[in-house]
Amino acid sequence: MARPPVLLLVLTLLTLAGCADEPSGDTGAASTAGAETASSSLKQPKPAEPPELVLKSAAGRQDAVIGAFCLEDPSEGVGTCSDSPAVEPVELTVARPGDRLILRLEQARVVEGRILVHPLGCGERTTAAVPLRRAAGTPFAVDLAPGAYELDVFASFQAHGGQAGEMTGSLGLLVAGTNAPGIVPASEDLNVCREG
């Protein structure tokens, strides 16, 4: 049975149209490379992050492990939140009783907040609470018995760029009677409350 000429013409056109859409040779690679170049040249938005939270001492600077936070950026008209399980310090600042420390928010000032002091690894056992000053930094003297401590920080802040928000962070402190100031890695051996 002979096929009608119109059906043959449609099938031929569909076949040719399908082949014309397929890239051949180097053309496909060139168009892919062009697409990658175009997309990589587009400016990607920087993810919203809270200000840096640091503990400054004679030993230097310890950066906090940042936990949960929420930010509002009025200039962008957006807000961002990041939830986190409880965080623990990865370093401990070695200090002696009476040494002066400063808890500081970089590029921001505290609106309201506090430091809860726990023996290291004992998040449920609060040893002391220190209110944060309504400023960029809160100086305080070490007034703790020798041992390892976790400083859990809760702060509402106003950043210099107009952002506002709330954040949590964790820092470590090792109070030692005779050791020279320093910053040491946190380790399970220093935990006061051990599991097991």
Image: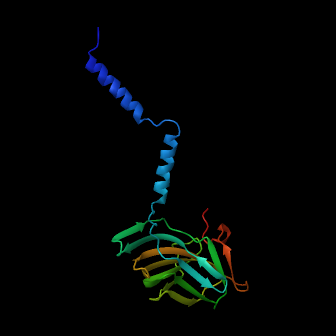
Horizontal side of 37 relative to 175 (left or right) equals left
Query: Is residue 168 shown above or below 42?
Result: below
User: 85 or 3, which lies in front?
Assistant: 3
**Display coloring:** rainbow
Q: Residue at 50%, 67% (x, y): give it.
A: 86
The C terminus lies in which quarter of the figure? bottom right
Q: Quadrant of residue 7?
A: top left
Q: Quadrant of residue 82?
A: bottom left
Q: How many marks?
A: 0
Q: Position of residue 95 (x, y in %)?
A: 66, 84
Q: Residue at 27%, 17% (x, y): give it.
A: 5
Q: Quadrant of residue 149?
A: bottom right
The N terminus lies in which quarter of the figure? top left
Q: Position of residue 83 (x, y in %)?
A: 44, 65
Farthest-out residue, top:
1
Horizontal side of 195 relative to 43 (left or right) equals right
Query: Is residue 80 shown above or below 37?
Result: below
Q: Position of residue 80 (x, y in %)?
A: 39, 68
Q: Position of residue 16 (x, y in %)?
A: 38, 28
Q: Residue at 40%, 73% (x, y): give it.
A: 71
User: 77 or 142, which lies in front?
Assistant: 77
